[in-house]
Amino acid sequence: MFQIGELVVYGSTGVCRVEEISGLNQPGEDREKRYYRLRPLWQDGVIYAPVDSRKVSIRPVISREEAEALIDRMPAIPAAACRGGTPQALAQQYQSAVRDGGHQALIEMMKAIYGKRSRAAAKNRRLGVVDERYMKQAERLLYGELATALEIPYDHVEGYIAVRLEGAEESAG
């Protein structure tokens, strides 16, 4: 069980702070059932999540060392193959990656969308709405957790990754 004040990753919401652990005072609710009151760090709102939920994953935020190791592995992670022939199929594929919540799946998806964005720009086109929406969601999830683990502002994460990977290229070359 997580403790009050602890930072956790909750499903596709991202990093949240555990503010309270209590029962809900709602009619018809089991008074013995315990809930986390979670406050997302990178968006507004409050979430009440059952302590024993099996539907939505809740896990600790990765450590600084794990975050740095993940960034170091990014160049070796391949882009996901986009199998969506229709916007709906593409959205399903992306939703699966977001729901999985795994760093690898998010990075694979982001790399695929970055590639699509580059190809679209080369043809003076814009990226599709589905791609844009899921790219923002993946960035919020991944960058939010990395910002938390690395103890840096959210809007510095992309630059931190670029500098770290640049340094890795220079030391390898």
Image (cartoon, helix red, strand yellow):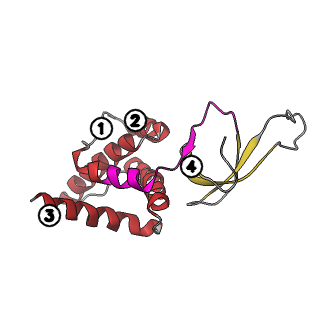
Mark on residue 170? 3
Residue placed most toward the observer, 160 or 127: 160
Q: Quadrant of the N terminus?
A: top right
Mark on residue 13? 4
Q: Mark 4 or mark 1, which is nearer the start of the sequence?
A: 4
Numbered disc 1: secondary structure = loop
Q: Mark 1 or mark 3, which is nearer the start of the sequence?
A: 1
Check if residue 56 falls in the magenta segment. yes
Q: Mark 3 or mark 4, which is nearer the start of the sequence?
A: 4
Q: Badge 3 local density, few (<14 within 10 Å), some, or many (20+)?
A: few
Looking at numbered disc 4 in the image, what kind of residue is underneath it?
Answer: Thr
Looking at numbered disc 3 in the image, what kind of residue is underneath it?
Answer: Glu
Name the residue at 44% across, 35% down: 96
The answer for how far apart the CA atoms under marks 3 and 1 are is 32 Å
Residue placed most toward the observer, 59 or 157: 59
Residue ID for mark 2: 93
Q: Which residues are magenta?
A: 51-71
Q: Are marks 1 and 4 in contact (CB under 8 Å)?
A: no
Numbered disc 3: secondary structure = helix
Looking at numbered disc 1 in the image, what kind of residue is underneath it?
Answer: Cys
Picture quarter containing residue 29?
top right
Q: Mark 2 or mark 3, which is nearer the start of the sequence?
A: 2
Q: Is residue 116 visible?
A: no
Q: Quadrant of the C terminus?
A: bottom left
Q: Are marks 2 and 4 in contact (CB under 8 Å)?
A: no
Picture quarter containing residue 78?
top left
Residue ID for mark 1: 82
